[in-house]
Image (cartoon, helix red, strand yellow):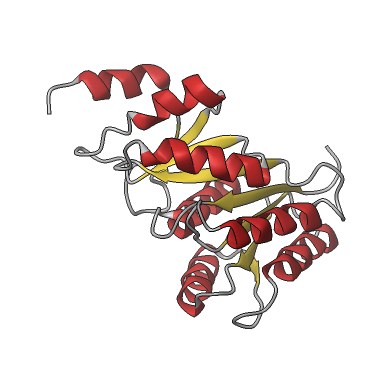
Amino acid sequence: SQGPTVIMVCGVNGCGKTTTIAKLAYMFQSQGKKVVLGAADTFRAAAVEQLSIWAQRLGVDIVTGPQGSDPAAVGHRAVARAIEMHADVCIVDTAGRLQTHQNLMRELSKIHRVLGKQIPEAPHEVLLVLDATTGQNGISQAKHFSEAVKCTGLVLAKLDGTAKGGVVVAIRQQMGLPVKFVGVGEKPEDLLPFDADSFVDAMFAES
């Protein structure tokens, strides 16, 4: 209720994280909210560039840092900018990482801690982006990321006619993690609130 809502987005390499963040920004913006992005994937210059292009296209503010700089510092500055601008939402991107790389998972935990230093209880949402074509490995991803950063929900990306995304059923059963959104295409508007009924219908529909 006070200050910006901080959303941290994480996931393995190539899961569709950056596009998902752009879609989230677009969705909040279309609800009349002011959005700030934090490009805390400082490992890959391409990731910052991709997010910056989206920010420019959508007309939202973005905070970046030099390549190889401390991702937690970029997250910290993004939250500071959001407070300063009286933004409604601050979305912090993080570098894609394999859930089995312990040092990278520790770094993710550090970003999580730093975000909470300016706004108590931040990040308010930690979204794990899962590629809808992921099989049983998705359960391992959900477990490891949740241990590191207390995930609050899943975004199922790349859910098109071929991908069923059935692994989310097991994740929900084992960990209680809800699916919040599904990505159904490349365009900014292609992010839909998760609807269990239509998801199950699609899963059982003949391919």
Q: How many marks?
A: 0
54 or 141: which is nearer to us?
A: 141
Q: Is residue 9 left or right of residue 17?
A: right
Query: Where, quadrant-wise, is the C terminus in this rendering?
Result: top left
Q: In this view, does 45 lie above or below 18?
A: below
Residue 36 appears in the rendering = no
151 or 31: which is nearer to us?
A: 151
Q: Name the residue: 51% across, 68% down.
A: 51
Residue at the extreme left of the image, as rendered: 207
88 or 115: which is nearer to us?
A: 115
Q: Residue 177: x, y in percent?
A: 55, 28
Query: Where, quadrant-wise, is the N terminus in this rendering?
Result: top right
**Quarter of the image holding residue 197?**
top left
Q: Residue 39: x, y in percent?
A: 61, 67
Q: Name the residue: 53% across, 27% down.
A: 178
Q: Is residue 171 above or below residue 83?
A: above
Q: Name the residue: 50% across, 57% down.
A: 22
20 or 73: which is nearer to us?
A: 73
Residue 115 appears in the rendering = yes
Q: Residue 157: x, y in percent?
A: 39, 45
**Quarter of the image holding residue 31?**
top right
Q: In this view, does 126 lie to the left or right of 158?
A: right
Q: Is residue 178 left or right of residue 109?
A: left
Q: Residue 70: x, y in percent?
A: 70, 73
